[in-house]
Amino acid sequence: MADDNPDSDSTPRTLLRRVLDTADPRTPRRPRSARAGARRALLETASSRRLSGQTRTIARGRSHGARSIGRSAHIQASGHLEEQTPRTLLKNILLTAPESSILMPESVVKPVPARQVVQPSRQESSCGSLELQLPELEPPTTLAPGLLAPGRRKQRLRLSMFQQGVDQGLSLSQEPQGNADASSLTRSLNLTFATPLQPQSVQRPGLARRPPARRAVDVGAFLRDLRDTSLAPPNIVLEDTQPFSQPMVGSPHVYHSLPCTPHTGAEDAEQAAGRKTQSSGPGLQKNSPGKPAQFLAGEAEEGDAFALGFLSTSSGVSGEDEVEPLHGGVEEAEKKMEEEGVSMSEMEATGAQGPSRVEEAEGHTEVTEAEGSQGTAEADGPGASSGDEDASGRAASPESASSTPESLQARRHHQFIEPAPAPGAAVLSSEPAEPLLVRHPPRPRTTGPRPRQDPHKAGLSHYVKLFSFYAKMPMERKALEMVEKCLDKYFQHLCDDLEVFAAHAGRKTVKPEDLELLMRRQGLVTDQVSLHVLVERHLPLEYRQLLIPCAYSGNSVFPAQ
Amino acid sequence: MEEEAETEEQQRFSYQQRLKAAVHYTVGCLCEEVALDKEMQFSKQTIAAISELTFRQCENFAKDLEMFARHAKRTTINTEDVKLLARRSNSLLKYITDKSEEIAQINLERKAQKKKKSGDGSKNSKQPAEAGVVESEN
């Protein structure tokens, strides 16, 4: 079918298309658009997880644009057979098939130039003018003639076609409108890029969403942790070597006197919070009534502590009631920048409730103080264990980042009635606060590799699971949290030492000599056992081949993906 | 040869013992002061444990200092190495940093005085006295 089309104008596809174009241009638009809207709704519900807000907005924009453009097109060139009515455009979008989208463009493009002889000069040889006028809608129209043939597969293909069309619209919208030389080649290229764009567009929203959601959570968690640390002297024993065992009064001052990097993060956090509230505000109102009811009920559950902290965070962020929480939350937000976000959308959702719950701000402050004492024990455990740094430690386990929010959520499902992501997110956010508070005082020279302090607590879950596996006996959750806390401190110290060693040698880059010095102090490398011996002993050859180029490539993933 | 090694070993061992004894004596004196201050007695075992611990830790310190100096491609142990060593305990680090700054200041003053001395030549008698006074204060 595809092969036959390019040569002749009177292919079944073109004929069908002409029929559709000429038949009832006005009235069918409503049922068409309604159908398209229904399909779009189905698509959105079905692929709500995968399609990003970008795609949705673009889809909406495209529908709007289609209608508006269709009207203008109608006015401008009513007599053209190839007129791009919104109906035909939508139909083309819906009928776009994935496999044919790659093949058809080449076949479709040829009939298009052939048809252009008949068409007015408006549709030039490259259809560039059309593209100029309707950049987003061009490919669907070009695709439509070729794809009308497989009408039998309409039902099945519509979803994927719609996505394809949306992605094509994405690709086209990204390209400059002045794509005058948008020849068939480029169009075919656009179309070929459609499929790869799909997974990227699916992936990007998650990445794009991470920072905003995290920042929203961190503020409240930080507030809570501030109170927790002030109320938790027993934790001083663990941190005796850290200057943070100093009076609690000093802690807020210490925190706020942190290097100026938080200021830069503040702007990002505000932007992120604004974006987040805008994007996720309308969608998650239903969660909010449940939460405040539970909080005000005054349940003495740990989950409440987290959720309260979380809500206070969100309210603080949204309402900007206090500058300090926002300031504090900024650092947490920056720290969490690299954390993966399985719970990201949920965190976004919960964070978005902030603007809708501004009236609860006063209640939150009271409740957070009340729950501060409750959440002390719980917050200390996960709080201190979050890592605010250790790029080298966490680099090994970025892939397990999502497991932590999941595992935390799983743990808290038993206890809390609230949505798991909220406490999970609150836990995640509470974690960076405490270690951050602990971290900064002893580091006088840190001008702030802020991303380094990102709590890759998510990565530590991997080690904790390993630990629990090798323990060969069931472990309490508290014990696992303590293990995570210890691991976190261990990695913090490790990276601090590496940094200090490098600085001691007058360098800014950590070299293997620094690591060798560290291992020597640890007693792993002695005069009898050298570093290379250890490498040979513990690192299998296959991993060595993978890891060593990766390490030497300077933080770039090797081989390039 | 073996005898030399043995005697050397014995000498080192006896030297070590003497050093340990010196440490033990110093620790005992310090513990007495603390006992007077806190009105709490120290048992002999405690003092012995503390002195043994101090001795072993001094060995570790020495090795670390040597490693740090070598890491910085130096052959002499520096105050920087000492500060690196004390970084774990913040109060200790602060104390050491203050002391090192004090010493640096004294050295600068001494250099300035020496320059003047080369010019004057009459303050010789004063300066050693001053230096001595400053050192005793420290």
Image (cartoon, rainbow, N blue to C red):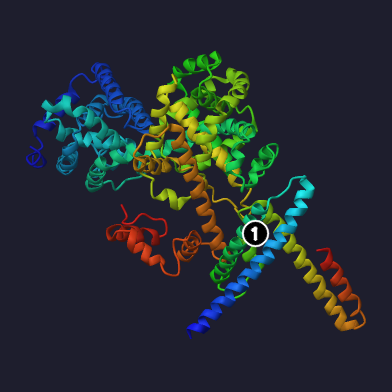
Tag 1 secondary structure: helix
Quarter holding the N terminus of chain A is top left
Quarter location, residue A524: bottom left
Left or right: where A298 falls relative to A420: right
Q: Please name the residue shown 62% across and 45% down the image.
A: A240
| Residue A335 in view (yes/no) | yes
Image position, residue B123 (x, y; %) = 91, 79
Left or right: where A430 falls relative to A205: right
Q: Please name the residue shown 58% across and 23% down the image.
A: A371
Q: With respect to residue A115, does A391 lie above or below?
A: below
Farthest bottom residue in view: B1
Along the line of sight, the residue nearer the viewer: A170 or A359: A359
Q: What residue type is labelled 1?
A: Ser
List the residue tagged with mark 1. Answer: B51
Along the line of sight, the residue nearer the viewer: A14 or A2: A2
Left or right: where A89 falls relative to A380: left
Q: With respect to residue A214, does A260 lie above or below?
A: below
Q: With respect to residue A145, does A359 lie above or below?
A: above
Q: Please name the residue shown 65% across and 69% down the image.
A: B19
Instruction: Rate crowding at label 1 as few (under 14), some (14 to 19) or many (20 or more) other CA atoms within 10 Å.
Output: many
Image position, residue A464 (x, y; %) = 40, 41
Q: Please name the residue shown 42% across and 59% down the image.
A: A554
Image position, residue A529 (x, y; %) = 41, 67
Tag count? 1
Along the line of sight, the residue nearer the viewer: A102 or A135: A102
Image position, residue A59 (x, y; %) = 33, 29
Farthest right residue in view: B122
- Parent chain of label 1: B
Along the line of sight, the residue nearer the viewer: A483 or A341: A483
| Residue A113 in view (yes/no) | no
